[in-house]
Image (cartoon, helix red, strand yellow):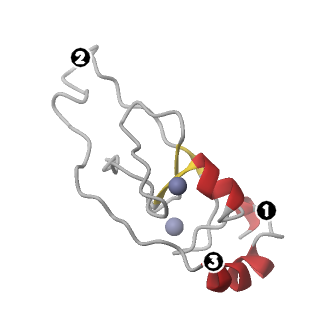
Amino acid sequence: MLEIRPACENCNKKLPPDSAEARICSYECTFCAECVETVLDNVCPNCGGGFTSRPIRPANNWKGDNFLGTNPASTTIKHRPVDRAEHGRFAAKVKRIPPHER
Ligand SMILES: [Zn+2]
Ligand SMILES: [Zn+2]
């Protein structure tokens, strides 16, 4: 199950569970859309994978208690700002490869 982390790991912008700006990699490293585009070049600084939109967990109990009320979003902030120079060197080679071929 996704943790649904509460903020962008780079800029610490709040990313509530209903945010349309949240992006995650396959390990659920979590960033805002702006950081993914302007800082990360769609390269996760931790694993090198690409990002996708984070799904929104329903706030309402539509079926079987599978909703935020039963499985709330994480409140543990992971703020570890990216070193832009270091990431630039790392992403330079990786960003040219489409995520599905990395
Ligand atoms: Zn951000
Ligand atoms: Zn990652």
Label 2 crowd bin: few (<14), some (14–19), many (20+), radius 10 Å: few
Residue 80 lies, in percent from the top left, at 41, 72
Q: Which residue occupies 63% across, 86% down?
A: 86
Amino acid marked by disc 1: Pro
- Whichever of callouts 3 and 2 sits on the residue coming sooner in the sequence is 2
Residue 85 lies, in percent from the top left, at 67, 83
Left or right of 63: which side holds 101?
A: right
Q: Rounded to the nearest whole Å, what is the CA distance between mark 3 and mark 2?
A: 42 Å
Name the residue that disc number 1 marks: 98
> Which numbered tag is attached to residue 84?
3
- Whichever of callouts 2 and 1 sits on the residue coming sooner in the sequence is 2
Label 3 crowd bin: few (<14), some (14–19), many (20+), radius 10 Å: few
**20 and 70: which one is in front?**
20
Left or right of 102: which side holds 30?
A: left
Amino acid marked by disc 2: Asn
Q: Which residue occupies 30% across, 50% down?
A: 3
Left or right of 47: which side holds 60?
A: left
Element assignment for label 2: loop
The reply to whether discs 3 and 2 touch (Cβ–Cβ < 8 Å) is no
Say which quarter of the image contains residue 21: top right
Compared with residue 23, is residue 76 higher up or lower down, i.e. above or below?
below
Amino acid marked by disc 3: Arg
Name the residue that disc number 2 marks: 61
